[in-house]
Image: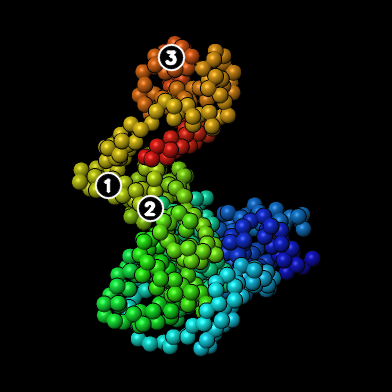
Amino acid sequence: MDQQELWKSSLGQIELSISKANFVTWFQNTGIIAIEDGIVTISVPNGFAKEWLENKYNHTILQSLRSFDESIKGMRCVISGPVPPGRRNLDAAQAKQSETTIAQVTHPTHKSTFSGRIDTIAVNTPQKTTALFHESNLNDRYQFESFVVAENNELAHAACYAISQNLARVYNPLFIYGGVGLGKTHLLQALGNEVKRRDPKNTIKYITSERFTSELVDSIKNQTIDKFKEYYQQMDLLIIDDIQFLSGREKTQNEFFHIFNGLYQLNKQIVISSDRPPKSIQTLEDRLRSRFEGGMIVDISQPNLETRTAILERKVREKGIDIESEVIRFIAEHITQNVRELEGALNRISAYADFYKLPPDLKLVEKALAQIIIQGKKEIKTEDILSAILNKYSVTDEDLKKKGRKKGISHPRQIAMYLMRSELNMPFSAIGDFFGGRDHTTALHAFEKIGKDIEINLRLKGEISDLKDVLYRQNGV
């Protein structure tokens, strides 16, 4: 089996083990260029793909390669400009995927008729004229490289990146939804910037639904509605942020519907974001809802503790702030809702440090975030801690409260006691009573033991952090 056949066979296995979005995004334009001393060298198109394959898919790739050649010991990626021989294998698979993912489109010259999920419509292709609004509204600081990818946003990121590499060939339309401050705008802007970087000739427009409505109203007042429609139908990539604000605006929805259909018919890319899925947007016309649901829908959820920590570490590097890892972890444990709040907390800490002329150590950070942390802790109850312990360790309420020192029970009981003291400041006597009438010294021993073990046991420290993460996220902190 030569290198090309080995990579082709390995890709076949890998494709079955990961999502289609990730496969298209990360394995496009890759190939084996050398095998030496059991080390496989894989060419990748850019540094982004190199980092992802080496860190995220290293095990998957090696496992697949070894199933065909047991002598392979490891792999590495190199950025390579020329197209590797194995590319055509993936391109063929990708083309086939595109055919099934997107309805067939007849590429137009002056007129075209679309036959697929959208009703048959004939639209005149607009001539390139002087546009009413020239700006793309893209901000260069939003790039894929500066976006922290994790479980909560992995699919949304992969879909956006795949679109940037294959405009209007995969996931059209793409609908991204999630709460405020979770990174939707960053992804949308990064998508637009990457498309622009790859081909500056592409016409791109990023706009919020409210700004779109405002421009539409102005065009109606100025009797330039035809030019308004013509301008938007020239877009190669149209990105509409916060589409939920079109809810209840019948005239705007009607005009957007026709622009959407025109672009889709011309095989142009449409990307939309919202704070909720299409089915949950009230007073949205059914015909628009069905168009949105006809493409790919992905969500971005709240970041977990490790993701928040990674985001803070990146922000700290970007801002040039000297903060110890212990302090970053503290911030991540207490600011749990979204990325925007994390950045706000970091700015607050930076301002405190500048004002008091002190280093941003744990003492200063606790002071800077005191009000936020206090508000959070007031909402935590003993029942919340108990519920989190029961779910994490698969024990019952009865197990924790009955007498006995079984290791499988005493460990989660001690952690529960520790949390009730550290998070709720409960008296040790009350904690003892809560757990089956135990003496206060038992609760005191548990608190001191767990507190001491955290300093030397990283696994235990992680358990406590995960539990705090669950507690504060459940209670909207």
Could you say where residue 311 lies in the image, as x and y percent from the top left? Answer: 42, 51
Asked whether the residues under the numbered discs 3 and 2 touch, taking CB atoms below 8 Å apart as contact, a structural biologist would say no
Which three-letter amino acid code belongs to the residue tagged 2? Val
Asked whether the residues under the numbered discs 1 and 3 touch, taking CB atoms below 8 Å apart as contact, a structural biologist would say no
Could you say where residue 69 lies in the image, as x and y percent from the top left? Answer: 77, 58
Q: Earlier in the sequence, mark 1 or mark 2?
A: 2
Residue 284 higher or lower than 465, as above or below: below
How busy is the neighbourhood of tag 1: few (under 14 within 10 Å), some, or many (20 plus)? some
Judged by depth in the image, the label closer to the viewer, 1 or 3, is 3
Q: Alpha carbon of mark 1 to alpha carbon of mark 3: how far?
A: 40 Å
Please state if 27 lies on the left or on the right of 362 as rendered: right
Q: Secondary structure at mark 3?
A: helix
Could you say where residue 419 lies in the image, as x and y percent from the top left? Answer: 43, 27
Q: Which residue is mark 3?
A: 433
Asked whether the residues under the numbered discs 1 and 2 touch, taking CB atoms below 8 Å apart as contact, a structural biologist would say no
Q: Is residue 34 visible?
A: yes
Count of picture labels: 3
Specify the label residue 180 is tagged with.
2
Q: Alpha carbon of mark 1 to alpha carbon of mark 2: how far?
A: 20 Å
Q: Which residue is mark 1?
A: 348
Judged by depth in the image, the label closer to the viewer, 1 or 2, is 2
Q: Is residue 47 visible?
A: no
Q: Residue at x 28, y 43 (%)?
A: 359
Q: Alpha carbon of mark 3 to alpha carbon of mark 2: how far?
A: 42 Å
Specify the label residue 437 is tagged with.
none
Q: Secondary structure at mark 2?
A: loop
User: For the N terminus, which image quadrant?
Assistant: bottom right
How busy is the neighbourhood of tag 2: few (under 14 within 10 Å), some, or many (20 plus)? some
Q: Residue at x 28, y 45 (%)?
A: 349
Instruction: Please tell me which residue lies in front, 194 or 377.
Output: 377
Please state if 69 lies on the left or on the right of 433 as rendered: right
Residue 216 sits in quarter: bottom left
